[in-house]
Amino acid sequence: MAGVPRTQIPELDRAYKYGFVTEIDEDRAPPGLSEDIVRFISAKKGEPEWLTEWRLAAYRHWLKMTVPHWARVNYPPVDFQDITYYSAPKAGQGPKSLDEVDPQLLATYEKLGVPLHERAILAGVAVDAVFDSVSVATTYKARLEQDGIIFCSMSEAVKRCPDLVRRYLGSVVPPGDNFYAALNSAVFTDGSFVFIPKGVRCPMELSTYFRINAAKTGQFERTLIIAEAGAVVSYLEGCTAPKRDENQLHAAVVELIALDEAEIKYSTVQNWYPGDENGKGGIYNFVTKRGACRGRRSKIMWTQVETGSAITWKYPSCILEGEGSVGEFYSVAVTNHAQQADTGTKMIHIGRDTRSRIVSKGISAGRADNTYRGLVRVGTLADRARNHTQCDSLLIGDRCGAHTVPYIESKNASARIEHEATTSKIGEDQLFYCRQRGLKPEDAVALIVNGFCREVLQTLPMEFAVEAQKLLGVSLEGSVG
Amino acid sequence: MALLQIEGLKVAVAGKEILRGIDLELVPGQVHAIMGPNGSGKSTLAYAIAGREGYEVTGGRALLDGTDLLELEPEERARAGLFLAFQYPVEIAGVGGVTFLKTAYNALRKERGESELDAMQFLKLVRAKATALGVGDDMLKRAVNSGFSGGEKKRFEILQMALLEPRVAVLDETDSGLDIDALKVVAGGVNALRSPTRSMLVITHYQRLLDYIVPDVIHVMAAGRIVRSGGKELALELESTGYAAHAGAPA
Ligand SMILES: Nc1ncnc2c1ncn2[C@@H]1O[C@H](COP(=O)(O)OP(=O)(O)O)[C@@H](O)[C@H]1O
Ligand SMILES: [Mg+2]
């Protein structure tokens, strides 16, 4: 039915249902960043000397770095002296059990649908919840300890297993890796730590819930996951933040280490506050996530569903060192209204017979911009390395943009690299077909978008796939008239 | 009272008048056929009734059981009981057939204040209806209309109709692209849905379909007008004389 005039697609307000603020006494540092603040954070957390020095070295490195500008995102310069780098709910440093957790906080998580408490056990999910800068509660710890699994906040790990932390922290993302990683290394406040010992298959999904609550606060969490030889773990993170008019900075670092035949699956459902329809407020999500497949036939799989944030800048990557190791990246990135996303992955093939697979689904609506940026690099020793990239963009309306920027560098002639890319629009014919069957336009869009993302959503654990599907629908509300 | 009442309907597409005053009246239980050469405006009529964007109604009325369809959004027309079997069913990549059917079915139940069926209940229902149309599990699992043959697409349309149980169904060239065996299956499906409380408007280019779905009334459309109406014998007459004999019909 070519030739039928398209009507303009008006934008309606999108309801962000996680936009509430929790009234809680916060213990916070004065705004701004200096060596004193770095020392303050380290002291607050009772850290050993080596870690304080590690942070300071990162800070000094950061001072010499400049904000990266290569991504296709636009925003006014961030004033790093106007940010609070430490903010913790006052009730306590390191609650010992759920009973010690501020009931207000528990109520917040309840509202967010995080299964703390018995709900966690029913759902079979162990949850570490990070509220602003501090890890609030880690459920289901005892059960995991029976298998020798350590799942706790990063602060606790520094105390409980300092050798592991010292050995692996910064070993995948060095403190000077990039501007935001350096910043994170200097001021990271908490995050999750996971250690799965040799041969252990983690008996449940591990999950962390991040929430930014305090105003003018940056969140800099640091996550470290180590899977020893033959260990298997699936880890999930979810994120929300209150509606605020100013932009808030989130600069996390995630490091994964997989030894021989270990398998790490890392899934993210990112729903930070995206700002309003005019682009006011929202989270700046500048995140460095990287996994090292150090062992033979090890495997790291990233799945991300990115629906929130005003700006998303992240490239979960795999360094495929181990012979026959496998890296996978499955991504759905949705941008609506004035949101911007520049996201993708890096697959660095170093070992022989390494394989990688990239499936990226970008969805753009309103006047949003969505860029896939991906690097596939094959080193001289990576004989028979293989990569397959599938990169699909879906446009809703005609004021949004989709861009695909693949970088391919191969130094090994036996490598096989395939890249496929498509761009499509939600057609008037598809919408009409669905509406003729009684579906409202927003339900039709949700259905079509879910179909478009199916390959990625399928890789999420069941409960979260359902959640992610709903989130996609909500994120695109108001994108068609 | 008529279940579907169309009076003086005029429709323009991209500023050009395509339908120039259509009158139709289908009482409950009736099946009417609209025949006419390509480009005479048959699909335009179907889309205009269903509320497709770009089909601008410039005059006249269309009522379903007394409700003014033209006031309603497409999905509201569907919920009021209007079903359109598409001449060219649309592919929706990645959306499984069952998911699609279930979403549509439950939307309708919700509208009627009935509880939604869960996955198991629904699968049972849809399988029963699908078997009669020769639609197997394998086809239900595939994405909607993706890689379907012409015949499969048309059977899937009729399956949707069987499931949604509309009060008024408009079937646009449901016979096109079907071999004789597929045609019989589809016609059987349609006939099974004939009921004293339902009306159907069957659009076709060929007389052949009307051997299997026998209409109560036949209309001949040419250049955006109904130029003749009559009983089923009209189809046979057209078969021998062709459309060219009718006034205003393009060559
Ligand atoms: N989307 C459209 N854009 C422009 N012209 C159209 C469109 N749809 C139909 N028409 C025109 O309207 C007339 C009737 O078309 P149609 O209703 O499809 O006829 P039929 O179904 O009887 O073959 C034709 O002249 C066709 O070119
Ligand atoms: Mg037609």
Image (spheres, rainbow, N blue to C red):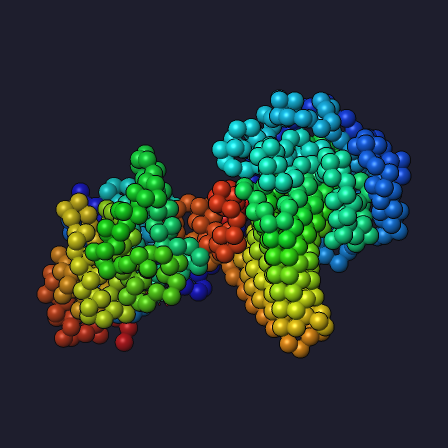
The image quadrant that residue B145 belongs to is bottom left
Q: Nearer the viewer, residue B246 or A149?
A: A149
In the rendering, at what x and y percent does residue A392 appear? 55, 61
Total marks in image: 0
Q: Could you tell me if residue A107 is visible in this image? A: yes
The quadrant where ligand 1 appears is bottom left
Q: Is residue A149 left or right of residue A456?
A: right
Q: Nearer the viewer, residue B164 or A388?
A: A388
**Vertical placement of residue A479 versus A208, above or below:** below
In the rendering, at what x and y percent does residue A435 appear? 39, 49
In the rendering, at what x and y percent does residue A405 appear? 66, 64
**Vertical placement of residue A3 versus B2, above or below:** below
Q: Could you tell me if residue A341 is visible in this image? A: no
Q: Nearer the viewer, residue B224 or A436?
A: A436
Image quarter of the N terminus of chain A: bottom left
Q: Name the residue rendered at 16%, 71% in the picture.
A: B238
Q: Name the residue rendered at 63%, 49% in the picture.
A: A198
Q: Nearer the viewer, residue B117 or A202?
A: A202
Q: Name the residue rendered at 27%, 47% in the picture.
A: B124
Q: Name the residue rendered at 76%, 38% in the picture.
A: A158
In the rendering, at what x and y percent does residue B82 appear? 29, 48
